[in-house]
């Protein structure tokens, strides 16, 4: 069955990006070289670099989180955090499966995502390490 979102909410290119992100995530180790779990903050940055998407730091409910915008947010999005936000490609949805999801911010679901200021604790070496791992992923298969 085709869902309403697949038929009317997301563009075919959004679904291509979703498929590519899902494929890329398969190539990411669960643990970084220091033996720590890979965090969404670094993973979103590495995948964003691969796909040419902008990263947003913020909150998912009360959890600190990072995700990708499918297009650039309007300049005044901080004044209207529940409106005028682009769709989201989340590569590490907290507490959810599947791990990689598209989210329509125009629906009532966007209340989970609250943009905040950029994080200051990003481990750039981990982002670079993840990016190198992602470069070994095979090209996207469009169905």
Image (cartoon, grey):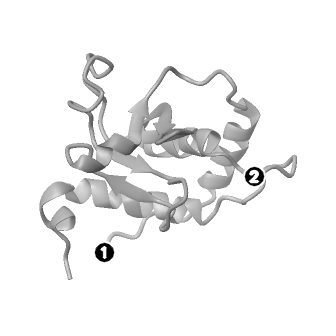
* Spot occupied by residue 20 in the image (x, y as percentages of width and height): 44, 60
Residue position for label 2: 37
Q: Residue furthest left?
A: 8
Horizontal and vertical percent position of residue 55: 47, 34
Question: Which comes sooner in the sequence, label 1 or label 2?
Answer: 2
Q: Secondary structure at mark 1?
A: loop
Q: Which quadrant is home to the C terminus? A: bottom left
Question: Which residue corresponds to mark 1?
Answer: 143
Could you tell me which residue is drawn at 31 percent across and 30 percent down?
72
Quadrant in the rendering for residue 18: bottom left
Instruction: Determine whether label 1 and label 2 are within 8 Å by CB.
Output: no
**Residue sticking out furthest to the front:** 62
Q: Tell me where residue 1 appears, x and y as whole percent.
A: 20, 83
Q: Residue at x 60, y 39 (%)?
A: 41
Task: State the residue at coordinates (81%, 49%).
Answer: 36
Disc marking residue 7: none
Of residues 110 and 99, the one nearer the viewer is 110
Residue closer to the observer: 16 or 93: 93
């Amino acid at each position: 069955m085709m869902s309403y979102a697949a038929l009317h909410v997301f563009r075919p290119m959004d679904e291509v990006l979703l498929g590519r992100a899902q494929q890329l995530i398969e190539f990411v180790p669960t643990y970084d070289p220091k033996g720590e779990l890979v965090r969404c903050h670094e993973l979103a940055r590495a995948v964003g670099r691969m796909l040419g998407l902008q990263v947003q730091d913020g909150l998912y409910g009360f959890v600190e989180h990072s995700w990708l915008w499918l297009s650039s947010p309007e300049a005044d999005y901080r004044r209207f955090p529940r409106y005028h936000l682009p769709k989201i490609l989340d590569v590490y949805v907290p507490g959810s499966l599947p791990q990689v999801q598209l989210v329509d911010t125009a629906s009532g679901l966007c209340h989970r995502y609250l943009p905040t200021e950029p994080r200051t604790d990003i481990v750039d070496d981990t982002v670079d390490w993840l990016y190198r791992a992602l470069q070994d992923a095979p090209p996207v298969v469009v169905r």
